[in-house]
Every structure is written in structure tokens, then in C-alpha cells.
Amino acid sequence: MLYSGGFFSTKEKQLIQEINKLKPEKLSIFSVPTKEVRLAEMFFRYKARNYPESLTEPEKQQWQQFCRARLLEKNTQGFLGLQDYRETLAALKQQGGVSAALLMDLEQYADGLEKQLQS
């Protein structure tokens, strides 16, 4: 998303600096001006990834939907979904030379993500 809309204007850069200076407890009350659509989405994802406790209940649901779509649905945007991830792990098992314990840990990680997203 960072590279999808061209360079940021001076005003947008100032807004980004302001966001970077925010203390975590201030994230939930800060709002990006509505005309800054790209920055608003980036700010939402920043909060969700780094400070999930700052999300409102609707934002938590929005984040869960985003994660579900990104990981569980067939991806046409080049992102690695869980199905492709599992196929890659299976190929690595067949190829050999990769720690079996590591591959098992990676499979368990995928299982945990899938359970979390389906709840």
C-alpha cells in the first residue's frame, strides 16, 4: 500500500511523522482526515499489527475480516495465503534438506492461525 499511490505530499509526510510520535495509548483517539484514504488504511493496519489493544470493537472485526480474506481466500494479488503456504511446506518436505522439526513448527503455526481466524 505504501507504493500504490505515488509519493506522499508534504502534508501527508507531516501526518506520518505525527503518527510516528504518538504514544500507544493515544492511537485509539487519533483520526486521520477522511480525505487521506491511503494513509487512513495504512494507519489502521499499523495499529492492528502493532497495537491491537488500541482497536475499537468495529476495527477488531474489520481486522479479522482483512486477515481472513488475506489468508483463507484464494489470492489474486500475489500474497501468500495459507493454502499456498501449506503447499510450499509440502514441497520443502519432498525436497529434503530442511529440518523436519522446523517444518513441523511452521505447520503448527499455520494450524494456529487458521483456528484463530475461523473462530
Image: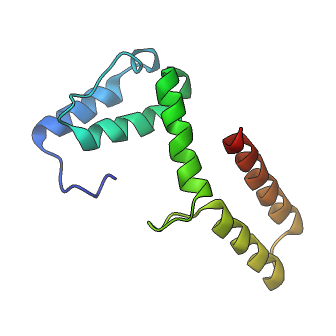
Among all residues in the image, which is located at the extreme right?
101
Q: Is residue 96 visible?
A: no
Question: Looking at the image, which residue is at 82% across and 82% down?
Answer: 94
Q: Position of residue 30 (x, y in %)?
A: 32, 20
Q: Nearer the viewer, residue 47 or 77?
A: 77
Q: Give left or right: position of 118 versus 29.
A: right
Residue 31 figure quarter: top left
Give the residue displayed 82% in from the left and 62% down from the top: 102
Asked if residue 8 can be seen in this view, the reply is: yes
- Residue 97 placement, left or right of 34: right
Number of marks? 0
Can you name the residue that lies furthest to the left here?
Answer: 10
Q: Quadrant of residue 98?
A: bottom right
Q: Residue 62, how many percent across, how many down?
A: 48, 35
Determine whether 12 is above or below 30 in the image: below
Most foreground residue, 3 or 73:
73
Q: Which residue corresponds to the image point at 55% horizontal and 22% vertical from the top-left?
A: 53
Q: Position of residue 49 (x, y in %)?
A: 52, 38
Q: Quadrant of residue 80?
A: bottom right
Q: Compared to 30, does 86 lie above or below?
A: below
Which residue sits at x=58%, y=59%? 73
If the image is split into quadrants, where does the C terminus sit?
A: top right
Coloring applied to the structure:
rainbow
